[in-house]
Amino acid sequence: MSAQNLLIAALVFMAGASAFSELEAQSGMEEAAAYDIGRADVERGRAVVVGVYAVPPGPDAGPGSPAISPQAGACFQCHGMDGKGDKAAVFPRLTDQTYKYLFDSLQDYASGVRQNAVMTPIAKALNDQQMRDVSAYYAAQKAADYPPVDRVDPQILQHGAALAAVGSATRGVQGCINCHGPDGVGLPPTYPYLAGQYARYLEGQMQAWKTGQRKGDGFGVMENIAKRLTDDEIHAVSQYYAAIRPRTVTPEKAEHQASTAPLPPTPSPSSAR
Ligand code: HEC
Ligand code: HEC
C-alpha cells in the first residue's frame, strides 16, 4: 500500500461514515426485481426521448399521471438525443450514466423524494416500463462530447481535488473517490459518475441535499456529506469534477478495481431510505 493509500485509508477510518457495504447490499436481490434491466428496451426508450409517451390533456390521460404534452415531455429537448444535456441551462448530462441510477432518479422525482419543478411532472407522467426503457437508452449512449473546461482558479481546483481524493478529516467527510470511483467515473450500479458533469448542476445537487429538497440517497450518505461541507468546499469540489474527464478508466474497470480494493469500515447508517 502506498503512502497516499495509507493516508486515504486512515482518513476513511477516521470519518467512519461509509455506507458503502450497506449500499452494495441494498442494491442486491430485492431491488433487482424493481429495475430489472432485462425488461428494458433501448428502442422503446428512444420513443420516450422524443416524447411519444406523453399524453396530451384528454380522455387518454391516465388517473394520477399529469397530462404532459409531447413537446413539454420530450427528454431530448433538454438532455439531447445523446444525453449531453445543456451546460448553460443546467440540464445535466445523462450520457453513459448508470442504468440503475437513472431509473432510481426518475422514481425519486415521481415519488417526490427528489423535488424539482421541471422533472417532477415529467417523471410522474412516465410508467415504470417507460422509466426502464428511457434509462436503458441514456445508459447506452456513449459518445456525446464534453464542453470545453472553464477557466477556474487553480487553487480552487486543487482544493476540490484534495476533497475528492481524501475528503476532510476535520469535517468527518471521506473522499468522494471511495464511492464515485477513480477519475469520478462512477461505480455501477449505484454510484453516478461526476467527471464532466456540469459544475452548476453538481453544486445545485449538493445544496439540494443541504436544504432537504433532495433525498432518496440510500441511508442519507450524500445528505450527510453535503451538510458537513461548507459552501466554498462544495463549490471547489464541483468545479473539480466538472473539469476532469474520465480517461482510461471505464465504469467496468472501475467496478473491478473497487471489488479488489479493501472496503472502508462499516458505518452506522444515519437515516434509512
Ligand atoms: C424542460 C427540460 C427537461 C426535460 C424536457 C427533461 N428534463 Fe430531465 N432534467 C432537467 C433538469 C433541469 C434536471 C435537474 C433537476 C434537478 O435539479 O434535480 C433534470 C434531471 C434529470 C435526471 C437526473 C440526472 C442526475 O444526474 O441525477 C434524469 C435521470 C432526467 N432528468 C431524465 C429525464 C428524462 C428521462 C426525460 C424525458 C422523459 C427528461 N429528463 C426530460 C430538465 C429536463
Ligand atoms: C459513501 C459513498 C459516497 C461518498 C463517499 C460520496 N458519495 Fe456522492 N453519491 C453517493 C450515492 C449513493 C449517490 C446517488 C444518490 C441518489 O441515488 O440519489 C451520490 C450522488 C452524488 C451526486 C449527485 C450526482 C447527480 O448526477 O445528480 C453528487 C453531486 C455527489 N454524489 C457528489 C459527491 C462528492 C462531491 C463527494 C465527496 C465530497 C461524494 N459525492 C462522496 C455516494 C457517495
Image (spheres, rainbow, N blue to C red):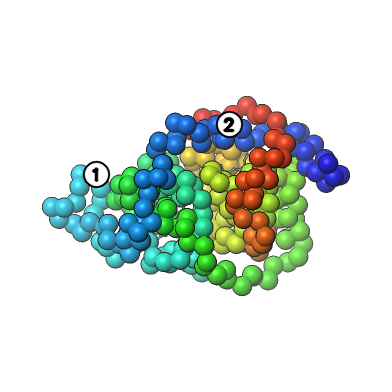
Q: Position of residue 185 (x, y in %)?
A: 62, 54
Q: Which label belongs to residue 22?
A: 2
Residue at 57%, 71% (x, y): give it. 147
Give whichever of 239, 77 is nearer the camera: 77
Left or right side of 164 for 54: left
User: Considering depth in this image, is 52 or 109 the residue closer to the camera?
Assistant: 52
Q: Which is nearer the eye, 232 or 167?
A: 167
For label 1, the SS is: loop
Q: Is residue 227 visible from the viewing direction of this image?
A: no
Q: Position of residue 27 (x, y in %)?
A: 51, 36
How far across and how far down the image is residue 122, in percent? 34, 54
Up the image or down, 224 lies above or below 200; here it is above
Query: Which residue lies under the disc numbered 1?
Result: 64
* Amino acid bearing label 1: Gly
Q: Which secondary structure lies at badge 2?
A: helix
Where, by quadrant of the figure, is residue 44 drawn?
bottom left
**Cα distance, mark 1 to mark 2?**
33 Å
Q: Are marks 1 and 2 in contact (CB under 8 Å)?
A: no
Residue appearing at x 52%, y 67% in the figure: 144
- Quarter of the image that includes the N terminus: top right
Q: In this orientation, does residue 50 appear?
A: yes
Counting from the top left corner in percent of width and height, residue 99 is at 47, 49
- Local packing at callout 2 (Cα closer than 10 Å; few below 14, some 14-19, many 20+) is some
Q: In the displayed structure, does residue 10 sit left or right of residue 219?
A: right
